[in-house]
Amino acid sequence: MSETPATPPEGANDPACDLRLPAAEIDASLRWPVLFLFASATAWLLLGSVLWLVTFVKFASPGFLADCPWLTLGRVRPAAVNAFLYGCASQAAIGVTLWMLCRLGGNRFVFQVPVIIATKIWNLGVTIGVIAILAGDSTGFEWLEMPRYAAAFLFVAYLVIGLCALVTFQMRRHCELYPSQWFLLAGLFWFPWIYSAANYLLLLDPVRGTLQAAINAWFTGNFAGLWLGPVALAGIYYFVPRLTGQPLYSLGLAAFAFWTLLFFTGFAGLTGLIGGPVPRWMPALSTVANVCLLLPLCCNAWNWYATNRGNRGAWKQSVLLRFILLGAACYFVAGAANAILACPDLAPKTNLTLLKVALQTLTLHGFVGAVLFGCAYYLLPRVAQVNWASEKLINVHFLCTAIGVAAMLLGFGFAGVSQAAKFAQAGVPFVEAVKSPFLALATVGLVVLIVGQCAFAVNLVKLLRGVCEPMCRRFCSTVCGRTPGAAIAEAKP
Amino acid sequence: MKQPNDNKPQQPAKAEQVSSGAQRLAAAASAPTPAASSALSEIGTEPVARRAAVPALLFAVLAAFLFWGDTHILSQGGELDAQVHYPFVSSNELVSLAIREPEDPRITQGRAVYSLVCKACHQEDGLGSTAVGCPPLAGSEWVLAGDPSRIIAIVLKGLTGPINVSGKAYGTGVMVGFGTAGGLSDEEIAGVLSFIRNNWSNKAPFVEGSDVKKMREQLKGKLDPMTVPELMNIPVKE
Amino acid sequence: MMNNGAALFLGILLSVAASFWTLLFAPQLQIGRQQVRALEDGELYPAPRPGLAQRGAEVYRSLGCAECHTRQVRQTGAIFEMRITDLGTNPPAVVALYSDDANQPNPHGTGTGDEGMARIPLRTLPAVVGTHLSPAAAQKMTVQFSGVGAKAAPVLIPLGPDMERGWGARLSVAQDYLHDYPVLLGNLRLGPDLANFGARQTNIADIHTQLYDSPRLTMGSLMPPYRFLYELRPITNGAALPPEAIPLTAADANRPAQVIIPSEDAVALAAYLTSLKADALLFEAPRPKPASPAPPPTNAPTATNVTGAVIFQEPGRADLLVGQDARQRVPAGFMAPLRELGIEKAPPK
């Protein structure tokens, strides 16, 4: 059905600026690129989760699959992480970016073929990269373990996708920019710049000494904070007003949060090096940045809260809104925890413990994951024009995400705290200091999370089948002039 | 304007010729379920925002954060120095932690004299320089001899002519003497010789000022630099 | 302004540039151009790795050891201890100085000035006569003691659990990593720190056994077994043994002895691990100065530090030993010497 703006909603400006095309038309133009992106993302998600589960089992029993060099712990973990970050999260982020830019700009997407080809190249690159890591050719740098030849594929693919997204943005019909578009643009620009800078300075023309560790830390902080983070923030900014039916509380607040976030996150990645072998002014800058990030954190949280205030009960009815709000809550907790753990008294004791893993899980799966899934649950049926097969599975997914992330946060969190306390006492033997009974809780959390991800995968497969079956049938009828059943019936003597 | 139903498949023209299974499939796919059409409708409209103004208070808060950040860098930033690592706070602290064991004052003075006077030829590492014709002091059997009389004589009067040091021959350079008026005092010569005899890999007894004074008396009146035969004439205690 | 795509682009570019120039370019000028440096004894630091150890570094990276092991020793502070090595010609004056409260900022032991006599164990030298001293206090005490003819030296004690666990003699600094590519500092400590592994573990057979099956040497270890780096071979009693074989179990009536033959990768990795040392004395990484090689005649128990020089040790100060975390090892004698296994080593070719 078409969208005709009857009366401009409160807060909308000049109606002459509002030239958006109907939503269904925009969605139809995005169908194949977005479906392909999310299908590949889901496949990588499941693969990454399986590999991650293997690492958890290896923690509990180190001899598990230990005789195969391809599955040794030091290779499986980076493979799982890279599969998730580049295979799943990045592709889902690109899918959300393209859809949201088109929807907010109000124009159709005209670059289906380049983006589909680029997605294939991206998938090829991630495949080569993950296999290379398992084969032993990892670079050793955190979140950059994929070797140069795999990174080249990703870079080429992203150039195409980025250019298409940028041109799509330029072709927008609705001239005013909504905060989500700012965040999406920021992510679109930051990713290639940090990826190329990190690859160049670490892999192509390596710098000398611990500067490599500093650049690596800068990259990981920016990957999470200025590529995946802004896309998720864009999702929250888009869906909280939309799903509650309220206008966003304050554009100015969002603008302030946007610029402060952009400026401070760039400096915030080096807290892991507090106490480490770098000149101490560099991690000190990161401490300041992490604390200053509380400012955009609070601005964002206030904006969303005040927007939601107009319709407090909305989250009970809408599972999509629950995903988005779960993401917002995880964002808030992660930001606050990062600021506390950046304190130079605490940081050297905690930043080599599992607390770091706890916060990473909270950010990547609780914040980015939940929001991207929430966005996916809204946009996928609309671009595919096929509804989700099972509403119950969506609820299962939400519960599993919430419980799984909470369990992993608590499990790793308590394990990390106990590790920090025991590492500080030299009298405790190291093998005793590392272990913690809470790791079992984290494993349970991961299993629950994977169950939720499987629920999503089942739903997605049914949705894709719902899209593809009519296509297949129409193809067969055009090519053969008959449906497959008829051909088989006629072939029988 | 496209309608959602445009995306539903059309019934094939020869529907009556298909088998029952395919017919069921086709029927199922083409019939829109009531739930689908309502759930695929848009929820709300594209979001809009109110209140374009940024609250001025936020800038004040930002300024406060930046002020705190500045003090944090001043106190924890290690003076932006490349060598100051956590937990040290400044390079002054590193200097204060670089306490060495207390040094015999003769060695300290001797080091200063060496840097001023001897380093130019005999080099910082005590290995001398074949280009200048300057023999090494580190590991030299002349320096390490138990009785320092001969090297005191060299320093007082200078040296000329060929000399064998550590198996190599040196002879192209001339060393000036420092025993003249305006040169080094007895204590200074004792200090620099003690330093030379206890630096690098050398280890030998200290030289006393009284030894230098005795040697100075003994060699009074000699104006030319020493030569090796003259040095060998100086009796040494074993 | 916020509706203008070009203005947004400019702002985003400026934010990237700010963090790039501050955190990437400025440090490049500071630490990215560091050079190899000469130490006090003339040695260049860091020394380049020999070829086999360099290959081992590649194996280390390829196996992903940095996922669980860090290579950065951390420190929480540094204090001085005052040690008297010679009472000189006037012991009563030394004792009087030591027992005068006004002169000592933080005396060793407890109590006030009355038990001053008891506080220097005059029978055993060297003795610690002051601890937790700041640099200024240490200097002052040195001058005071040398004023009464005693020989007293301040010794720097780095503080921190890493030091106490024997993981290093001083913190890791940027200079330590000049020759490394990639610099694998590690992000998570699920295994002990390896920055100084070569200083505390030089027994190649133990290293190979730990890589093959870590719980044999460290009870309860979480480290996965790297059996694929080795070949397990049973050796019948009396058979000749290849020189590189490492015995694993002794023979008994029912089965032959087992040895493991390390592969090239394992040999390279062991060479790399034994090359890991980061304890040179640097300006930015002060550490206890290694004492002169000749030990003084004294009946105090002494201990060797990593450089083989003798440091003075008080009884009970085992934390000053820079060595293995003794509690982690199973009792010595687990690995029987070859002759007890009844195995003759193959004659050298």
Image: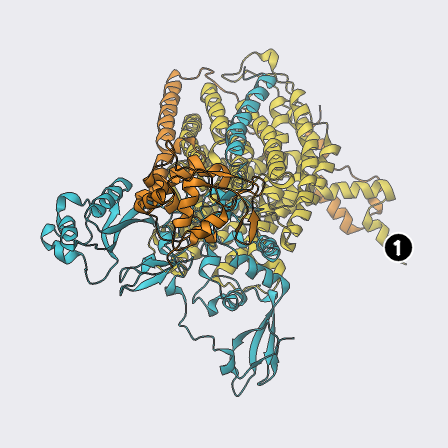
**Type of colouring:** by chain
**Does B125 sit above or below residue A232?**
below
Helix, strand or loop at label 1? It is helix
Mark 1 belongs to chain: A
- Location of the C terminus of chain B by quadrant is bottom left
Q: Position of residue C82 (x, y in %)?
A: 26, 50
**Residue A17 is at least partly visible in this image:** yes
Q: In the rendered image, which quarter contains the N terminus of chain B?
A: top right
* Residue A9, percent from left and from top: 52, 18
Name the residue nearer the viewer: C120 or C180. Answer: C120
Front residue (pair C341, B100): B100
Q: How many marks do you count on the picture?
A: 1
C249 or A240: nearer the eye?
A: C249
Residue at the bottom extreme of this rendering: C253
- The residue positioned 63% from the left and 20% from the top of the image is A20
Q: Which residue is mark 1?
A: A491
The structure residue drawn at horizontal position 64% and vertical position 16%, both measured from the top left corner, is A19
User: Is B210 placed above or below C233 here?
Assistant: above
> In the rendered image, what is the letter of the chain coloured cyan?
C
At 72% from the left and 41% from the top, the residue drawn is: A120
Residue A138 vs residue A235: left or right?
A: right
Is A327 placed left or right of C56 in the picture?
left
Chain B tint in image = orange
